[in-house]
Image (tube, coloured by chain):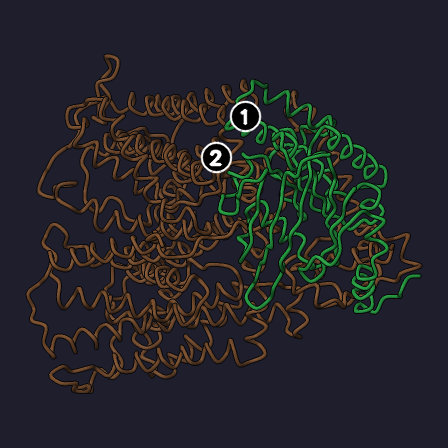
Chain colours: A green, B brown
Amino acid sequence: MSDVILTTDDIVVKFGVLQAVSNASIEVQSGFITGLIGPNGAGKTTLFNVITGLQEPTQGHVALQGVDITKKSPYRRARLGIARTFQKLEAFSSLSARENVLVAAEQRRAWDKSKFDAGAVADEMLERVGIADVADFMVGTLPTGTARLVELARALALDPKVLLLDEASSGLTEDETEDMAILLRRLAADGLGILLVEHDMSFVMGTCQYIYVLDFGRIIAQGTPGEVQADPKVQAAYLGALAESDAEVPA
Amino acid sequence: MSLKVSPKAISAIVVAALVLFVIVSNWGGNPINAKNITTFLVVGIALGGIYAILAGGLVVTYATTGIFNFAHAAIGCFLAFAYWQCSVGWGWPTLVSLVVVLGILAPLIGIGLDRLIMRRLRDASLVVQLMVTVGLMLSFMGITLTIWKPTTARTLPQFFRDTSGVKIGDVTATWHRIITVIVAIGIAVLLRWLLYRTRLGISMRAVVDSRSLAGLTGAKPSVVSGTSWALGCMTAGLAGILIAPETGLVVENLALLIVVAAAAAAIAQLKSLPWAIAGGLIIGLSKSFAGVFLSFGKDWSYAPEAIPAVILFIALLFLPQARLETGKIKITKRTERLTKPWEALAGSVFVFLLVTFWAKGWIPWFGTNFGERSDVWLGRGAGFMVLGVITLSLVPLIGWAGQVSFANFAIAGIGAVLFSHFGGQNGDPKGILLVMAVCAVVGVAVALPALRLKGLYLALATLAFAEFTDKVIVRHPSMIDPSASGTLFKPLKLFGFSISTNSGDREAFVIFLALIFSIFMLGFMLMRRGRFARRWIALSDSPAASATIGVNLTVQKVLVFALSGAVAGFAGCMLGISSGALRVDSFPMFVGLPLVLLLAVQGVRYPIAAFMAVIGLALFPAINELLGKPPWLSAIELIGPGIAAITMAFRPEGAVFYAGRDLAGFLPWRGDAREEKAIAVAKLREQDIGRDEIGELGLTRPFSPDKISQLDRVLHVADELDEHPLVPEASAVGDLHPDGQNGAARTPVGAVNTEVGQ
């Protein structure tokens, strides 16, 4: 079996009185796609921010390959092999798509001593996520879904060990989502550990091998897609969220 | 347990030691007795009270609108002059004048600013917000100078000047001071009550966090922001009227109070009203302490004036580190392409030839005597080219890395002064390298305290540094000896040429500067294609994403400040040569501001914009002379750049960008631009609904059928609408969570698309 590459141990994040994440412990394995799901505001993005160092946890530890990185700054974590995309676009909007990826590829020189041509890496990554045709467009002018793919290519240009994707499929068409799933499976097969936050349930259930369910900052269930779907607590969490918004209870 | 000393504790000890050192070494010898202490407190609290009113208003405006108003003190200045006009000029009763100025004029200015300008800045970038309010500052200064010519001396009398005041021990507190303190307390209580106890105030505080959610509290955002600006202007006017009897009714003095207000705002972390008031008091008491107990020798005689700037810097050291925020990106729908190397070369050669032709007299210069070349005009031309290099130094810093600095003119000033000691006095060009190195370090040192903070603090810090340079650094006799006369610079010996501003050499000097400018411009244009510029732009577009791809933000910011400082230092050497002699008052803070503003107006990302900015700068005095120096244009060098900057509220990207977008298609080799324009026109037809508008639909204005259909298209829900009619989001719980902060606009989509889909 594969190795555990990333772990969070008992993470707590408090914003004033609000506890956004409560004692969340998860594991990400190399070569696997792990899902992180939950209703809006469950704390998924906050947990992502803790892992990448953008949010300091009130309590708990993050470890990469068994080494504690809780105190490391975001850029050091990136250099250790954590890459991510963002729920709300954080593409470099006044650079072209190619420049976006190129910045990351050039940055990799700071820690990756192997010889590579940053320009070639950038072109390869754009090709890989399927947006080579818009390479010279300013990202600010691209549709949201395409800009998300730019973010993905940018993350991949770092040649990371772990990839964190925050709502990778939002803004994508059905076909593009399908392509994305194929790409992720291929990346995982090459040994990358992937952690995925997603709202599109068919995408999650069809792509992830292991799923954590977060609700009100707490992990209420984990397991294979089948196990999670069958879990009454998960159903209650999702149904509860719907009931609160006065929506119909689906069958 | 290991002994851990936090960096803040170390800073605290170092700062305390330094302050103590300054106090001890400049002790004036006044005994510490009841009389002196009472004087210190009475003066300090009264002064601090005025500062508190000023800072309180500034912080309230910032906290409720998200815009830091650099024009705050300048508006106060304008209102103080207006009050003088009513009460002294026209002899109206005090109370009537106060009501007219503070009760009518101030709110009108505030509401007008909000309506016409400030609302457009809500979603603008920090650079644009800063440029517009700094432009307003220069405009208000210029308008005041135009209406009330500084050639006439005016004094604003104290309130109740005929009464004797109140005895506190051996000290008499004038009624003006007592009134000041009472008014300050009243204002503080009033603002606090308004913000925390009234419905309007609660809405005002909510608006900054989320405009769409604030709509739910029932207040109209427009009423809220209008009230904020009206309040801001009223407090500024009140502070101006109260302080004018102390500082004199002088435009520069009153507008400079912005540094005081900024320092107090920094202590308040920009948002806390009680701390803003405390900050005002701290500054007032510090100044009063220095006045009563300290006596700075003649070398440091201006030091007390720099107290606010120093307090600002100290405050920055103790602010908590800013988080790397996500989800705040301001997407600009901007198309542009990289300048090709041959285009860069062609542009640089064009600029060089244009200036050379002008220096040769082949392009006539309009002025009093149309087309007549003179040494005076050549000298001014040289001066403008030097300013051009200073402006160019801002392109990587502000344009690419997004770090707004108002310090570069001051850094160039320091460079000029240093060069007069290290090489310039012998015409030795090696000194230039040394000056560049020192200025690079100065540039970094200015920025260092603010690097870990939000961009706005950096702007405040650089403004404070510009003020500190003018008041302390260049005024020390070892920097500029006021008794030295004649030229401080010998002709520069470079490759066998002799470069100076002597009348015979002046034409060659201008051509030399044109060459220098073109080379720097070419260098920057080529640099824009390289990895450093890319990384800096990335850093400016999204600091959070930059960090997560492994960029060490601090190192990159230090690099860009060093580069910018070095170029400014080089420009400083040229500034020294072109001015020949230096005076201690050559580098006031306000002189540097138009450079920054005009660069931004032309397009802060583009090196060529620096040249256009300088043409603009030269145009204002030229127009003035052409029209025969009419009195209504006397302040054009302030109002011109000021108004130009204000237009950025309407066209934020800068002239170079709009020219490129609208005119590039006319160039024969730019088929790509023609194509792009066609696409843009087509897109405009199926115009998208703005993100902001989505948030406000249904909250501040009713849904209309066409808006609904636009909304459907944006949200991709058109097909699902039959099954799941779009309901306004009810999940307030979700919105309280950090994930869903701006959720109002987006959660309905999630709810319809995913959860229900299960």
Percent across and percent down for residue B689 are 75, 53
Nearest the eye: B654 or B305: B305
- For the image, the number of numbered tags is 2
Mark linked to residue B609: 2
Q: Is residue B369 above or below residue B110?
A: above
User: Which chain contains the residue that carries disc 1?
Assistant: A
Res B110 visible: yes
Q: Amino acid at mark 1?
A: Asp
Q: Which mark is residue B119?
A: none
Q: What's the residue at 42%, 75% (across, down)?
A: B102
Q: Spatial distance from mark 2 to mark 1, Cα to Cα?
A: 38 Å
Residue B258: quarter of image: bottom left
**Mark 1, other Cα within 10 Å: few <14 / some 14–19 / many ≥20:** some
The chain carrying label 2 is B
Q: What secondary structure is found at the residue carrying circle 1?
A: loop
Q: Position of residue A84 (x, y in %)?
A: 64, 40
Pointer 1: what residue?
A112
Dot 2, crowdedness within 10 Å: few (<14), some or many (≥20)? many
- Quadrant position of residue B263: bottom left
C-beta proximity under 8 Å, tags 2 and 1: no
Image quarter where the N terminus of chain B lies is: bottom left
Question: What x and y, as percent, mark residue B284?
Answer: 26, 68
Residue extending furthest toward the top: B496
Q: Amino acid at mark 2?
A: Ala
Q: Quadrant of the C terminus of chain B?
A: bottom right
Q: Is residue B444 left or right of residue B452?
A: left
In this picture, residue A78 sits left or right of residue B231: right
Question: Percent x, y for residue B745?
Answer: 72, 59
Residue A206, image quadrant: top right
